[in-house]
Amino acid sequence: MKQFNPEGHTNHQFDVELNDVKHKVMTMGGLVESMVSDGLEALLTMNTELGTKVCEDDKTVNKLELEIDRECTRILARRQPAASDLRMVLAIIKTISDLERIGDEAEKLGRISLQMAEETDMPHYYKDLRHLGDHVKTMLREALDAFTRMDVEAAFSTAAKDEAIDTEYANLSRLLISHMMEHPALLSHALNMSWCARSLERIADHACNICEYVIYLVEGRDIRHADLDEMRKQILPAKHG
Amino acid sequence: MTSNNSDASTNTDTSSASSVTSSLGPLDLEKGQGTKEQSIEEIVASLGDTVGKTRVDNPKMSATGVDVFYADKQAIFGVDLDIANNEVISMIGPSGCGKSTLLRCLNRMNDTIPICKVTGELTLDGEDIYGRDTDPVLLRARVGMVFQKPNPFPKSIYENVAYGPRLHGLSRNKSELDDIVITSLRKAGIFEEVKDRLDAPGTGLSGGQQQRLCIARTIACSPEVILMDEPCSALDPIATAKIEELINELSENYAIAIVTHSMQQAARVSQRTAYFHLGKLVEVGHTADIFTNPRHELTEKYITGRFG
């Protein structure tokens, strides 16, 4: 099994730099994860305090993105990494841009929660939104775990979950449309809910991207825009063999 | 193959059959160091077969099962490798890995070392270069070499370049010789800098100019293959860039093999890269693949700077 280890360079300082940037990505991942969780909670419980916090956190995430980008640029310029080190830096550059987008989506949840805080009624599809949100949260957590552990198997099984989430999103959209037709007065509310569901679905897509970067990093194979099952068959049995 | 080598390979029969990543040397190496001292043959055998395609469609030179010994010490173990036409192949690896030794075998430079013994097959256009009929002097005209340190003759710039063609009788008269000298200097990208002082001593040029003069001297014999043994290690970055640009241009007409300690240089100038370790060819492949996704763990360790 291919293993990625950022350590072991003859030049120890390089280890330190790579580890440092990796830890920053993990910090950013953790922050983004809690933003998604908070944004969803703010929305479902009409918690304006949490909603405001999510909007504030987004600024920190943006700062982290810039900082990590700068560090990656510095590593590329000074160390000219090759092979797994190069893939690590490239994967990080891509990962943080997805994390930043997840942050944006979570911020949207927070913003909409602030807008809707005055409304008191809780239509029944909140239950479905929570359900979708929980699945997305799990997927994001697993994607970040796969990144932290550089675990290809976990990355594959997490990426595979995207399809189920897409289906769930489609179902929820249908529910919202029928709701809009039944209660035209609550149209704007239902539309907001639809935006939120869309944000959650996008978060899952970004989590899926992160899984693909993990596989690229460890295996050196780019599986984007390829058949997931096919790639899994190609990559995983070889490792058990 | 030597008897040593094949003996050792039976010891590790179990591991050599499995996939690339699981038959790795370093694990065996570490185990070996912890428990008992391994002989070099055992370590080499544990490295497994060469990873990647050693053969090409248009080989200019081919090595097959080449072993090289310096007295009792084996320096190269069963190397198979093609050097393709119109292509640059770089050979990289830690010191003492045999890359320079192999390069020197390609134009029989090792003939001058009495204790050196070469077995296996080395061919140029399919002809055995160690065959009885092969004249090493003629071979070296077809397979030229550029060395680590620029080593112009203590003669004029003109004479440095004219020496080879004159020796091999490549020109019938002075004007033909002039043509060869000027074309060679031009191809080596140094003509403009020296055209007004062709009578000045070659040793009076700067390091980078001297190296390009040596390349001109090599080209003047109209070789088919150019071997370069760390041609830029004594040069500054600008001179290095000029030589690399030159290598790129020359690869249109020649087969080029370059030994370099600078991995970045290997990445920049070559189309194929061969990685050597302890006298064994560990991995060979397209340079882009070797530098983004090497298949052998030792290659990975070397090019990411994880040795020692």
Image: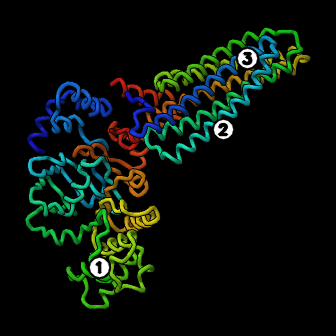
* Residue at the image position 81 percent from the left and 24 percent from the top: A111
Q: CA distance from mark 2 to mark 3?
A: 26 Å
Q: Which amino acid does the dot numbered 1 rest on?
A: Asn
Left or right: B209, with A178 as reference point: left
Which residue ends up furthest to the right in the rendered image?
A: A185
Disc 2 and disc 3 in contact, CB within 8 angstroms: no
Quadrant of residue A3 within the rendered picture: top left
Can residue B17 be seen at all in this image of the molecule? no
Of label 2 and label 3, which has the lower sequence position? 3
Locate residue A101, reporting x and y percent.
Answer: 68, 31
Q: Secondary structure at mark 1?
A: helix
Up/down of B276 relative to B31, above or below: below
Quadrant of residue B23 within the rendered picture: top left
Circle 1 or circle 3, nearest the eye: 1
Q: Which residue is mark 1?
A: B160
For label 2, the crowd category at 10 Å Cα-Cα, with few meaning under 14, some 14 to 19 and many 20 or more, is some
> A189 or B32, which lies in front?
B32
Quadrant of residue A47 within the rendered picture: top right
Up/down of B66 relative to A113, above or below: below
Q: Which mark is residue A40?
A: 3
Q: Which amino acid does the dot numbered 3 rest on?
A: Leu
Q: CA distance from mark 1 to mark 3?
A: 79 Å
Location of the N terminus of chain A by quadrant is top left
Q: Which residue is mark 2?
A: A66
Locate residue A141, reporting x and y percent.
Answer: 59, 19
